[in-house]
Each structure stands twice: as structure tokens, then as C-alpha cells.
Image (cartoon, helix red, strand yellow):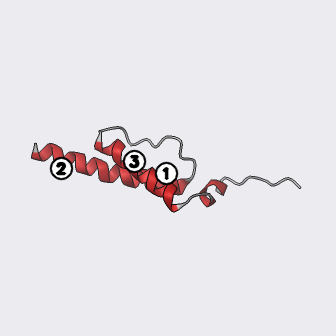
């Protein structure tokens, strides 16, 4: 019996560890001034964690630039 893949199937395969890793990668990207373009995160929840990290990292980078 073949199983049909649904577009949201990737959203069911994540863990706290994968969310944390995506957040940290996004944070470092934002902190170093990289563009807000998550790479290789097909699941929306993982991409959202990456983007949240990027937002926080980018905000921190802007704070550091103001104080320099």
C-alpha cells in the first residue's frame, strides 16, 4: 500500500533539538549580517525557528553597531 505524501508532512518531523539548531543558525546569520533567507529548511516550523533566530541576531547586530 503506497502512502501519499502531503505538503505539510515535513512539519510533523521536527524535534526540540532541530528547532534549537535552526534558531542558532538563524541567529548567527542575522548577527553576521547575512540575508534573511533560510536555506534547506523544508518544514515551516523549522524555517520559522530559523527566522526568529535571524530576527534576534540581526537586532543584536544593530545594537552593537549603534554602540560602536
Image position of 47 (left or right of 67): right
Question: Which mark is first along the chain, 3 or 1?
Answer: 3
Residue at figure coordinates x 29%, y 39% from the top left: 32
* Image mark count: 3
Q: Nearer the viewer, residue 7 or 52?
A: 52
Residue 1, percent from left and from top: 89, 55
Residue at 79% from the left image edge and 53% from the top image edge: 4
Dot placed on the residue nearer the N-terminal end, 3 or 2: 3
Q: Mark 1 points at which residue?
A: 47
State how far apart marks 1 and 2 are (Cα).
Answer: 24 Å
Secondary structure beneath label 3: helix
| Distance (Cα) linking label 3 and label 2 | 17 Å
Disc 1 crowd rating (10 Å Cα; few below 14, some 14-19, many 20+) is: many
Mark 1–mark 3 distance (CA, rounded to whole Å):
9 Å
**What residue is pinned by disc 2?**
63
Q: Which residue corresponds to mark 3?
A: 26
Q: Do the residues labelled 3 and 2 touch (CB within 8 Å)?
A: no
Q: In the shown orientation, is residue 48 left or right of residue 28? A: right
Give left or right: position of 16 versus 65. right
Residue 58 in the image, given as x and y percentages of width and height: 29, 47
Amino acid at each position: 500500500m503506497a502512502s501519499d505524501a502531503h505538503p505539510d508532512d515535513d512539519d510533523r518531523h521536527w524535534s526540540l533539538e532541530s528547532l534549537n539548531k535552526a534558531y542558532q543558525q538563524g541567529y548567527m546569520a542575522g548577527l553576521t549580517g547575512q540575508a534573511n533567507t533560510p536555506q534547506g529548511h523544508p518544514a515551516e516550523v523549522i524555517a520559522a525557528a530559523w527566522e526568529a533566530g535571524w530576527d534576534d541576531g540581526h537586532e543584536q547586530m544593530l545594537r552593537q553597531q549603534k554602540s560602536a
